[in-house]
Amino acid sequence: MHSTGDGAAGVPVLRFVKRVYLGAALLIALLLSPVSSNECPHEHKDNKTNVIIISFMSNKHVASITSEALETGFNASLWARQKDHNSLVNTKFITVKHDQDPVKKLRECTENKSALVVVYGPMGDAHTSRTQSVLKELNVVGFAPFTGSSEVRGWNPHLYFLRPDPAAELAALIRYAVAYLRVRRLGFMHLHGVSYGEREFELAVEWLTQMGYEFCCVFSVPTSFEKPAEDRTFDAAYEQFIAGRPQALLLFGSPLHDTEKFIERFLSDERASGVSLLVPVYIQNTFMLCVKKVYDRDGKVSTGTIVITGTTPLPNDKRYDAIKRFHKEITEFFDAHKEVKEAINSKGLHLDDSHGAHLAHGWIMGEVLSRALSAKEWLKDQTTFRESLFNQRRYIVDDLVFGDFGGECSEKVASRGAICRCNQGGSVVYLKRILENSRVVPLRSGRITLGTVNCYMNTVRLHPPLNGLFILTKDQTIVNRANSIMFSGAVTLNGDGSLGNTDRVFMHLLNTTESDAPDALERELTTRITTAVFGVVDSSILNHNGVAFIDPIPLAPRLNSHRPDVIHLSPTVEQQFFVLAKYLTHNAFARPQAVIRNEAAADFIDVLYETMATHRSSLGHATLLSADDEMKDKLPRSGDVFVVGLSADDVPYLVSHLQECQDLRVFLLFSDFALHYDLLSELFQSGLGAERLLFATHLPHWADTNAKSTTIKKYHAAVREPKLWSPLSLLGFTTARVMQEVVQHQDRMNPKALVDCFYADIMVIVDDMRYGPFHSDNCGAVSGLQLETCSVNYGATNISVWSMARALDASVREAYPPTTPSMVYRSRTVLGLSVPTFVWSLFAMLSLVALLFALIVLRFRGDARDNRNAPRKPTEPVTLVFTDIESSTALWAACPSLMREAVASHHRLIRALIVRHGCYEVKTIGDSFMIACRNPFTALQLAQELQQVFLAYNWCTTEIDKLYREFEVLAAEEEM
């Protein structure tokens, strides 16, 4: 089978479908077990209460294998509980086939008053709607109805839902689409005229609008149970839908003919190749049948990722204690019924990914009912039992929780924490994904857990996600490794599935190469919802527009550019220099030197000069290195030195040099330290010289197990393995924590909204860390260090100076205590004037001198039209020179904007040479010159030099040369 997209289900999906039907006969056989009966009991046994469970799970519109699996699982639980000698009840399970009248059997069993009666089900929306009045009349509760639409939900004391609200499944799938698939084009499919799908579509539109999104395309046609939509109507709606090019599709069509027709066409349509399909459990069987049909017909299925909801864990997901016990008891149930054991052949049937889940669901429902029947005072009569179900009930089945259920109560009681008018207790929606090997695996990240505050989803608001990106470039070892570590810390705070403010931050990885990274990021921004880039980035990424950069770590150190779309949470280079300079001058150390490897090394030196001057000191000798220069032999043997631009190859030399030179101290930038932390830690294991390698940081110690810091306590709780604790991992974690706090104040989420939130909130406080104040004013033409006073896109506070010795051992104290630098630079003075004043004064004086010089030159040199250079004697010969720009008309037509600048430069160059050679500009016509020279030699020199100057001049474009080449090619072709 053909498959496309990531995780597309091809032939494996077909095998999955075939296994479903393989188990049908076996499940029917299972239902012949002694636990099941078709007669109502008429007497009590062993002083226990008789409880009759009548199954309303049979429905002609639902595959029999589904209802049979649900009944078998339920039966297995009842059978296991019957073996408990402390049980207060004798249970009888009555099955009713879809061609029989379940209401008649219900009336028969309730009229003899010999037992409590419970209905298991009903199955399906229409069946549930039709049954409600009968349940009310007979004072019976429908236990664990299996429905698909939100239309049949709502307060009803005769329906006891143990599956989550279908709207919760919708919320889980929308959340997965925008926060994990991150699709920009999301489609929706539903039908008009039936209960399932219409309310879900209205709710989906409302939720997407709340988040600032909308559907790219919607398919919907009028239909009914009896009659499908007309072909012409269906075809027109489908073509309009597919033209919207959805990346993912929410499939909420009622399991009818038109839904089947849509699925089959969609799975056969090459235009839908790679589209992710998001399917609620209610139509899972219909969907899988369509997959089988399309494959049998076409030999392939075009689809992308297939994600299906679930209301119980997968039957093979043994992370849950309840599922472990399910395996044990269902196996014992099979073994106890010898008449079906041989037919099973293998006990693996109950592990089937689809109907095995229905078996597990039925078993869990039986476990809940057993708990509901566990107190004698609740079993007095039908009314007492029904009312007890809503007496603030919660059920715990090993590690699964159902509830809270509550009945009628006053607003006063509700305000004090009671659950009122709530007949729905399913609290978790699970997501599962069909893999290529035909198995279904849980999507742990897609699971949502509903709180008890809102019984139903109609009051829930969905929030837009903050989708962050860490870029892994596989051919850049340092970037790949550093971002992997930072991501591992940040991803621990990914959405928790609560649909609240702690469920809004989602970190993702973008795998690419160094050369393709800018294009890969552009593709990602175009096709996926992306809010911000995090982690280590090189200049090609950092120069990208259209996305926010939150606390980026440049691969090569960079000075702060004060871009409003770049938010620095870690200390900037300028802040680090400020704190380190304060430390140096506070301890009266000698002037530090500097060794800087960076393309902007001169700018780094300027900042260091300004910083040291602000602290009433100065910078010593500075060594500037190119990217290819080795640092070896460039470091001094004593004193203090700033080292900027450390490479992995430099680290061994740096460590050995420090250990050899006992009077030397080295100051690193935090980024250089963090990127090479593992190597530094390894080489400094002996501790020798570690106290003389220093850096500035705002972080608490990542490995301090005795820390009082709230940040570190939360970090250690999230990253439990001590060997994974590191500065980069902690940095990723703290950055994600800031994002969690920031998004709480945002109803919209996009790059601009994110950065604006920092400037609007001014100060951000997260746990025991503080960032800010941030502000962004109109800085006009201000540049350089003066930007510090008008635009603040950085916010690190409490920056301390650490030694490498402290990095290795949290018990070592900081070299300098936490401080928040003012970042106010003190101007140096020259001749009693501030530097800016002195510079402007000097500039004014030099300008006057230059003006006088220019006047003198003009007085004696003249210009190209100086009449003194014009030939005036009629008896002497005159040599005329004519110039013209070849194909100028075509050039003007092809690139008018370039020609304006080029012609202006052309004229300036010619007139300068006319003056130099003492010739005379007779006239100009367009771009042509007529020049008069006194003799032929001078004219020849002028012409020669004109050609040389034109050839050597930087025209700042290659477009004109390109056009000339095209003209020559055309001319050559015409001659041929």
Image (cartoon, rainbow, N blue to C red):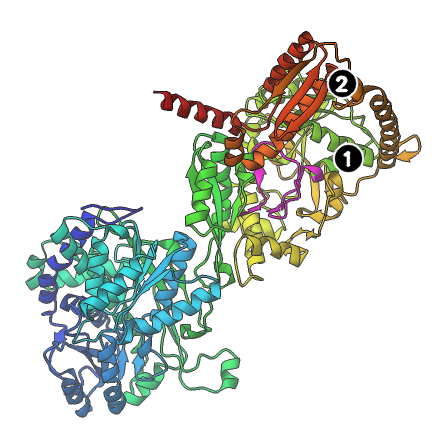
Q: Is residue 585 at least partly visible in the picture?
A: yes
Residue 917 lies in what quarter of the image? top right
Q: Any mark on residue 781, and which?
A: none
Query: Within 10 Å of the Cα at label 2, are there few (<14), some (14-19), or many (20+) other Cα atoms?
Result: some
Q: Residue at x 21, y 48 (%)?
A: 10
In terms of secondary structure, where does tag 2 sit?
Answer: loop
In this rendering, the count of numbered labels is 2
Q: Residue furthest top?
A: 937
Horizontal side, residue 875 vs residue 947: left or right? right
Per the rendered image, the range of residues in magenta is 547-575
Label 1 to label 2, Cα distance in Å? 61 Å
Q: Residue at x 50, y 47 (%)?
A: 490
Kind of residue indicated by mark 1: Thr
Q: Residue furthest right?
A: 832
Residue 57 lies in what quarter of the image? bottom left
**Residue 115 horizontal/vertical position (percent):** 21, 86
Horizontal side, residue 812 vs residue 77: left or right? right
- Asked whether 877 falls inside the magenta stretch, the response is no
Q: Is residue 498 above or below residue 731?
A: below
Closer to the camera in the image, 736 or 307: 307
Of the residues tagged 1 and 2, which is closer to the observer? Answer: 2
Query: Within 10 Å of the Cα at label 1, are there few (<14), some (14-19), or many (20+) other Cα atoms?
Result: many
Residue at image mark 2:
870
